[in-house]
Image (spheres, rainbow, N blue to C red):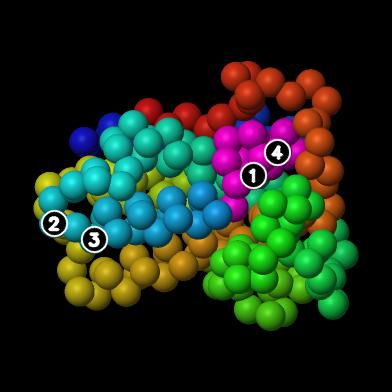
Amino acid sequence: MYHYLNTFEEERVCEDLLDCHRGLYRFFCDYSELSFWKSDLSAIFDQVLQDKPSFEILSPKSIINQGGEFLHLIYIGFFLCQKTHFPPCPNPTWKDLILKHTRRRTPSLIDRIRLLPHYLSPKEIQDPYLFLKDFYYRRQCPDWARRWNQLIQESFSNLTFLEPEDIVVFQADFRDFHKLLEATYLIYVRHFTTEMPDGYDSFNLNFPIMF
């Protein structure tokens, strides 16, 4: 698996706000929804910790495909952090937390609770940029991308090479990836339309190199 997953900095992943909108629309509407991505990240987390990959929940193809989609989100989050700054939401209501079409399909409070942010702090829920700035300050975007690919590669390994002290770092990184998912979702919910963006073509989006 050495060099099987490899990330290179790609300037054209997200060039402008329209590119950003297209990427967010693909990730949270066209490809799947938030509940799927929450479960997916947790499944990849569990897969990495196993001594032998079972692929009972996620197939190798699913891990590669969905890993590539999340890799794109890492670059989208960086664009949002660097090129935009939408205002905070001091008192978020349902419309500020969950997409409209998702609210229609989940009128039950119990079902909606599962979609609320579980990793962001209350202040970060109000202003997701607080997390994004900290996230990309601690590591550069390409470094986060390489870290993500490293974890995806680890999910295919027959043996886990994580020492006890490494597991703490691993858990912290996965917590950060969960927070990235929640932060980008909240920005999408509050500041972008869920209608298909102009010129959207899921087959011709600019993706970072993964292989």
- The chief SS type of the magenta part is helix
Which mark is on residue 28?
Answer: 1
List the single residue furthest toward the bottom: 122
What x and y, as percent, mark residue 16? 78, 36
Mark 1–mark 4 CB contact (< 8 Å): yes
User: CA gap, disc 3 to disc 2?
Assistant: 7 Å
**Which residue bears the numbered disc 4?**
25
Q: Earlier in the sequence, mark 4 or mark 2?
A: 4
**As rendered, which of 148 and 11 lies closer to the eye?**
148
Image: 14 above or below 147: above
Q: Where is the N terminus found, in terms of image quarters?
A: top left
Mark 1–mark 3 CB contact (< 8 Å): no
**Which residue bears the numbered disc 2?**
51
What x and y, as percent, mark residue 148? 41, 49
| Local SS, label 3 | helix
Q: Earlier in the sequence, mark 1 or mark 2?
A: 1
**As rendered, which of 171 and 38 lies closer to the eye?**
38
**In the rendered image, which quarter is residue 18 located in?**
top right
Amino acid tagged 2: Asp
Q: Where is the C terminus found, in terms of image quarters?
A: top left
Amino acid tagged 4: Tyr
User: CA gap, disc 4 to disc 2?
Assistant: 36 Å
Q: Residue sitting at 31 percent across and 47 percent down?
A: 57
Image: 167 above or below 142: below
**Which residue bears the numbered disc 3?**
49
Q: Residue sitting at 85 percent across and 77 percent down?
A: 90
Q: How many marks?
A: 4
Residue 26 magenta-drawn? Answer: yes
Q: Residue sitting at 20 percent across and 74 percent down?
A: 164
Q: Residue sitting at 63 percent across and 19 percent down?
A: 204
What x and y, as percent, mark residue 76? 65, 44
